Image (cartoon, coloured by chain):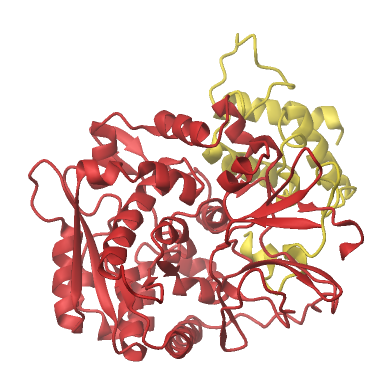
Amino acid sequence: MTHDQIAARLEGFVRRHFGVARDDPAFSRRAHLFQDGYVDSLGVVELLAFIHEEFGVEVPDEALVPDRFETIEDIARVVHGLVDGRVDRGLADAPPGSWHRGSSRDSGLDSSRAAG
Amino acid sequence: MFQLVGELDPNFGWANGRVVTTPPDQYAPLASEPRGAYACVARGPAGVQIARDALGINKLFWARRTDGELLFAARPRHLVEAGCRFEDIWAVPPGTAVQADPPRRTPRGVAPGPLPLAALAVRIRSELDSYCSALARELGDTPVYVCLSGGLDSTGIAVVARRHLPGLRAVSFDLDWAGSASSGDRVTAARLAADLGLPLSRITVSADELLGLLDTVLSEGIDWRDFNVHAGLVNAALARGIAQQHASDTAAPVALTGDIANELLADYHAEQIGGRTFYALPRVPLSRLRAALVRGLEASHREVGPFRAWGVRAVQPYAVVVDHYMALPETFLGLDDRKPRLCRMVFGDEIPDYVYDRPKTRAQVGGREDGGVLGLCLDRGIDGQVLRARFAALHGIADPALLSRFICGGRYRAALPALGGLT
């Protein structure tokens, strides 16, 4: 599946599920979904559920970082990486000058279970 | 190097049958990851230790100031006051365990097979008993309260805690608003306290008194979303009431709460007031909803934060049994009566029937026709937008839209800072 195909499905879901007007001039695959109010905090959970249903992947916590998960284009990139197994869950999403180590993946808690 | 701004919240972790109360700024290598509430950032002999419990109960934020200095704090507001921009603040991810000596690397064991429901119930009860017993030893004669709402979760904590904490007292919240009678929560809590033999402190606040706590709740609760702010207001009133009774004590009182159990069983529903829906839930399958609610525990400090503001240490015993709850079979999670059914197995008839028979209610509503704290806030025009704007103002944020970048998907924006050669 290509990046563009993923983005198209995501766009269809966002338009349908969150009631984006067909003629909304501000909405595009580069619109800031959360900051511009297209998707609220409940909607994120619904969006993640859709991604799981549609593409069979779970978006890790580390990917839910602003700048990397903000627009449909961003999200399609993350999903494409997960589908292809290319996303390094630990390092892909750290902000500049930061690193991940010893996150919940290393903890005693089974994070995959805790995350459902 | 780094600097700690303000104090971190006290630790009440749980590991290897012991309560872990190591001061959060003190280096103490972890043999295993604590459950319960735990956070730490400390310098050790060979490097820096940064830790945070798996649920993210205790908070730990960081930011790099424009002069390059790395700052840690338990509240974003402390970092803002120390000269950091809100946009530059990150949370340490829940479940973090970084230490240099010895390097932390816990081998993942073979996961145990699924346990039958009855066995899980036994383990939940056994571990709650062990935790409360250990708390009793740790706390000595410190005043300990249990927050009674008259619901199953707080009653469960009360019946376990009273077995181990002989001086246990109960505390109940009510709102004196528009001349209404005592809430269902207060009436049930009073009856329950009498039946359990617990002295009850009745904390009743006026509408104006309660709303006067709002700024503290927004800052200390680190959240602007209505369901958590309203819960935080209840907790702030309880905390203030407890603190007033112990103004001259040297040891900070402790408050046990039944929080977290609702998330662990996805036992929430939206509230309807005046034909409008509040506290809406995501429209996803139940198992996914529960996962979202549990992971969302990280992005609010509605319990520990408001209590801490008045010098009361909040402890949430259900946080130590999270693994057993998460192991409950999915078929059980689908039962409408899963909460009372599990409580019957864990607490049996130690919980009176009138608590089992009570309709589910949230502390923010309190079983009141007028909607309790939720109804009051709406009546005064304090809706979600107002809370969001006020939180932004308190943190020096010019554009409240930026907040959607701070809490995303039920989690604070999270990463670990680069520590250079310190680790």
- Residue B340 place in picture, x, y as percent: 32, 71
| Colour displayed for chain B in the image of the structure | red
Please tell me in which quadrant of the rendered image residue B192 appears: bottom left
Please tell me in which quadrant of the rendered image residue B268 appears: bottom left
Q: Nearer the viewer, residue B373 or A79?
A: B373
Is B222 situated above or below B344? Answer: above
- Figure chain in yellow: A
- Residue B50 place in picture, x, y as percent: 73, 65
Residue B83 seen from this side? yes
Q: Nearer the viewer, residue B75 or B191?
A: B75
Taking the spot 71% from the left edge, 39% from the top edge, the residue there is: B88
Q: Nearer the viewer, residue B28 or B118?
A: B28
Q: Is residue B141 left or right of residue B124?
A: left
- Residue A109 place in picture, x, y as percent: 67, 71
Q: Nearer the viewer, residue B262 or A85?
A: B262
Is B186 situated above or below B106? Answer: above
Q: Is residue B285 left or right of residue B314?
A: right
Taking the spot 65% from the left edge, 12% from the top edge, the residue there is: A26
Residue B328 seen from this side? no
Is A93 situated above or below B74? Answer: above
Quadrant position of the C terminus of chain B in the picture: bottom right
- Residue A72 place in picture, x, y as percent: 73, 28
Quadrant position of the N terminus of chain B in the picture: bottom right
Is B169 situated above or below B51? Answer: below
Taking the spot 56% from the left edge, 15% from the top edge, the residue there is: A21
Q: Is residue B341 left or right of residue B1?
A: left
Taking the spot 69% from the left edge, 21% from the top edge, the residue there is: A31
Q: Is residue B86 left or right of residue B415?
A: left
